[in-house]
């Protein structure tokens, strides 16, 4: 019989040292929902975006009782085993709402997460159990290892109270993007919620304690969001092209036969051949036709 794990307030000294604001609680329904609520009521504020500078706030919980994934999916996690964090950043409204480039915000979150995990592994001298234990991204919002889900990401746009009514007069105002990141770091095989999920400790040896891992990864995520988003804000189109090449190297679905499941219940099957300039997925069906997939759950056949 499994023993229920008790939640404890996350201790995040390294993250606190680099973030502009850290909120840590032992339990909440969803760190994204808590971040959105606090931004809305003014209890979590971020300074306006300035050229070359970007504020990053963190909301962390040891346990989520109503964790959410993309398209209404649930995110199941265990306290003391799974990292559940939300990162809030303030960026220009014009970029956040521009469909020609805003798809890259989710891809940036994925790359930041891979960088943070790989950096933590290197810092502690840990090593993969097998040479092919690479961390990859399953378009558009999952972290994969060996074809299994190790983590998930969820982004939400929030209009801060000071941003006005959303009229044309505010078109250049800042908005806040909340990136929720859930990672199975120290989850044993018996705790995995589905046969399609996995945990970092099952693939990497020599890792530190869960608390150290969570803090080291979150510290790197704060720094990664700040660095990458400053560059993206300065040159969205130019960064989109370089991001496209970078994602190509870590895109788990690329070159595989996949099935895209859309919210209306329809599906589309074909080969994932790459990403478009707006970060949408290119799926080539058997008849040689290329289709653009912008919102779907994608699974390998």
Image (tube, helix red, strand yellow):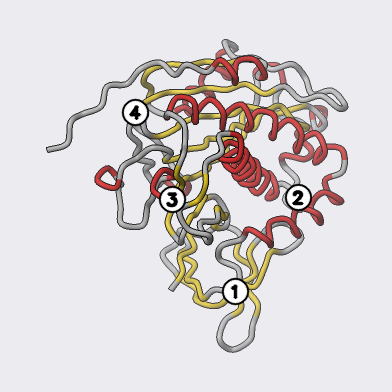
At 47% from the left and 71% from the top, the residue drawn is 259
Local packing at callout 4 (Cα closer than 10 Å; few below 14, some 14-19, many 20+) is many
As drawn, the label of residue 255 is 1
Secondary structure of the residue carrying tag 3 is: loop
How many labels, in total? 4
Q: Rounded to the nearest whole Å, what is the CA distance between mark 1 and mark 2?
A: 24 Å
Residue 256 x/y as whole percent: 54, 73
Work out how far the residue at label 1 is from the one at label 4, CA to CA, in angstroms: 36 Å
Residue lying at the far bottom of the rendered structure? 287
Q: Position of residue 65 (x, y in %)?
A: 32, 29
Q: CA distance from mark 3 to mark 4?
A: 20 Å
Q: Are marks 1 and 2 in contact (CB under 8 Å)?
A: no
Give the label on residue 118, or none: none
The quarter holding residue 159 reads: top right
User: Along the line of sight, which residue is nearer the eye, 190 or 178?
Assistant: 190
Left or right of 150, for residue 118: right
Could you say which disc has been placed on residue 79 in the image? 4
Chain-order first, disc 3 or disc 1: 3
Tag shown at residue 203: 3
C-alpha distance separating marks 3 and 1: 24 Å
Q: Secondary structure at mark 2?
A: loop
In this rendering, which labeled residue sits more in front, label 3 or label 4?
3
* Vertical placement of residue 31 versus 281, above or below: above
Along the polypeptide, which appears first: circle 4 or circle 2? 4
In this orientation, which residue lies closer to the viewer: 150 or 54?
Answer: 150
Percent from the top left, x then y, of residue 270?
54, 78
Q: Earlier in the sequence, mark 1 or mark 4?
A: 4
Q: Are the residues at dot 4 and dot 2 in contact (C-beta closer than 8 Å)?
A: no
């Amino acid at each position: 019989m499994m023993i229920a794990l008790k939640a404890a307030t996350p201790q995040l000294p390294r993250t606190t040292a680099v973030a502009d604001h850290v909120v840590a609680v032992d339990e909440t329904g969803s760190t994204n929902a808590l971040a959105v609520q606090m931004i809305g009521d003014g209890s979590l504020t971020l300074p306006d975006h300035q050229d070359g500078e970007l504020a990053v706030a963190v909301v962390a919980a040891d346990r989520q009782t109503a964790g959410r994934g993309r398209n209404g999916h649930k995110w199941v996690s265990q306290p003391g085993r799974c990292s559940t964090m939300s990162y809030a950043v303030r960026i220009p409204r014009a970029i956040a709402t521009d469909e020609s480039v805003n798809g890259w915000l989710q891809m940036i979150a994925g790359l930041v997460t891979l960088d943070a995990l790989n950096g933590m592994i290197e810092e502690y001298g840990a090593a993969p159990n097998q040479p092919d234990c690479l961390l990859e991204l399953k378009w558009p919002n999952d972290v994969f290892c060996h074809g299994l889900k190790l983590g998930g990401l969820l982004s939400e746009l929030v209009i801060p109270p000071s941003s006005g009514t959303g009229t044309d007069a505010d078109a250049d105002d800042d908005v806040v993007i909340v990136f929720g990141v859930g990672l199975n770091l120290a989850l044993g095989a018996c705790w995995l919620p589905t046969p399609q999920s996995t945990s970092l400790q099952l693939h990497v040896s020599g890792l530190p304690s869960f608390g150290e891992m969570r803090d080291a990864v979150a510290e790197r995520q704060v720094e990664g969001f700040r660095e990458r988003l400053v560059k993206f804000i300065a040159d969205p189109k130019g960064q989109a092209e370089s991001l496209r090449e970078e994602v190509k190297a870590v895109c788990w679905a690329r070159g595989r036969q996949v099935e895209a499941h859309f919210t209306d219940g329809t599906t589309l099957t074909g080969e994932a051949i790459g990403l478009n300039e707006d970060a949408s997925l290119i799926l080539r069906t058997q008849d040689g036709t290329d289709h653009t997939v912008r919102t779907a759950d994608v699974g390998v056949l």
